[in-house]
Image: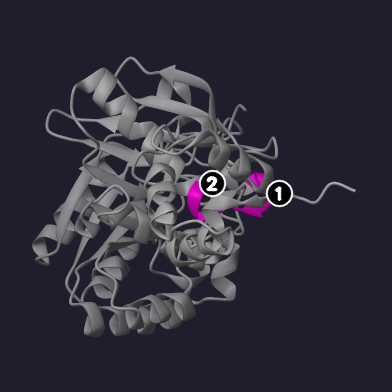
Amino acid sequence: METKKRDIRALTKEQLRNFFVQQGDKAFRGNQVYEWLWQKSAHDFDAMTNISKETRQMLEDNFVINHIRVDQMQRSSDGTIKNAVRLHDGLVVESVLIPTETRTTACVSSQVGCSLDCRFCATARLKRMRNLNPDEIYDQVVAIDNESRLYFDRPLSNIVFMGMGEPLMNYNNVLKAIDKITSPEGLGMSPKRIVVSTSGVPKIIKKIADEDVKFGLAVSLHSAIDEVRTSIMPFNSTFPLKDLREALEYWYSKTKNRITYEYVVWKGINDTQEAADALVKFCKFAPSKVNIIEYNPIDDGEFQQAHGSAVEMYQNTLERNGITVTVRRSRGKDIDAACGQLANKS
């Protein structure tokens, strides 16, 4: 009976070194392979040209590299690129490259489907099929970095975990991926250029704060009134706003990092002065900024973008109270690559 090959990227550098010693080889061979796997993103053992053919064959016999494949790439009229990424088991996630004049941002997925049930989001309708492994998250970033260099002549500058899935429901793997992305032995990116976006899982927010992480945190808030938030994000009944607020206060006390709130204003849902005042009150306990995001429909018409005057009212209310606010126009809408649209059509 054929034994199942191990995923080589699940091994630490130390485990790889030990493996080679057990094979009667030198420990440094593990360092070489590790460099091929992470810094050079080798997709197969034959690419490891400074290693003998016999050793490559031995690796082939024992291990597998479960790399991703970009199945389909779509380009938007505004330059945004969306990748349909096929995983080793045939499942598909999507990731997005968002270019501006000065930078390129990778929007990456952390789960196939999503653990949560936000009613305005296409991904949430898929339900969670599985968590992504650290290497599958890492590979999405590598693919987008390559596209950034090819199409925009510059390396990737920023990463947001705002693709498919709730990153904090795949907390361990997301953290391992970020460790690899920021390590000099990986992509060497600054953690300050990474933002993890969550719908708000209080227990995990506190746990991350204790880990002394250096990346930023963004919270998809969309309402600071419990009943309203529960109507659009049903899991809010399990993680109510007071628990979220307490966790974010703890996050700020430990990290001293300003909190970003992502906020969509919908017609007839949260487009009132009362809703804006509640948001101001929620923002006051720790330094924060608010990104008001344009809504991107997911076909059924239940949620509609609020009138421009409502967005303006929010902007004025927040600014009057000394809270930084940015109104974000969505990118990649024509290819369903905008916020909340991932997995809409695929």
Q: Which one is earlier in the sequence, the residue at label 1 or at label 2?
A: 1
Image mark for residue 5: 1
Residue 70 location in percent, x, y? 51, 27
The residue sitting at 45% across, 60% down in the picture is 174
Identify the residue at image location x=38%, y=57%.
28
Between 43 and 211, the one nearer to me in the picture: 43
Residue 37 position in % (x across, y down):
44, 45
Give the distance between the C-alpha atoms of the residues marked 1 and 2, in whole angstroms: 41 Å
At horizontal 18% and vertical 48% (from top left) the residue drawn is 326
Q: Is residue 232 left or right of residue 311?
A: right
In the image: residue 285, left or right of residue 218: left
Q: Secondary structure at mark 2?
A: loop
On residue 24, the disc is: none
Q: Nearer the viewer, mark 1 or mark 2?
A: 1
Residue span colored magenta: 125-135
Residue 217 on image: x %, y %: 31, 64
The type of residue carrying mark 1 is Lys
Amino acid beneath label 2: Phe
Q: Position of residue 162 (x, y in %)?
A: 41, 48
Does the magenta portion include 130? yes
Q: Residue at x 44, y 55 (%)?
A: 30
Determine whether 331 is above or below 224 in the image: above
Q: Which residue is mark 2?
A: 120
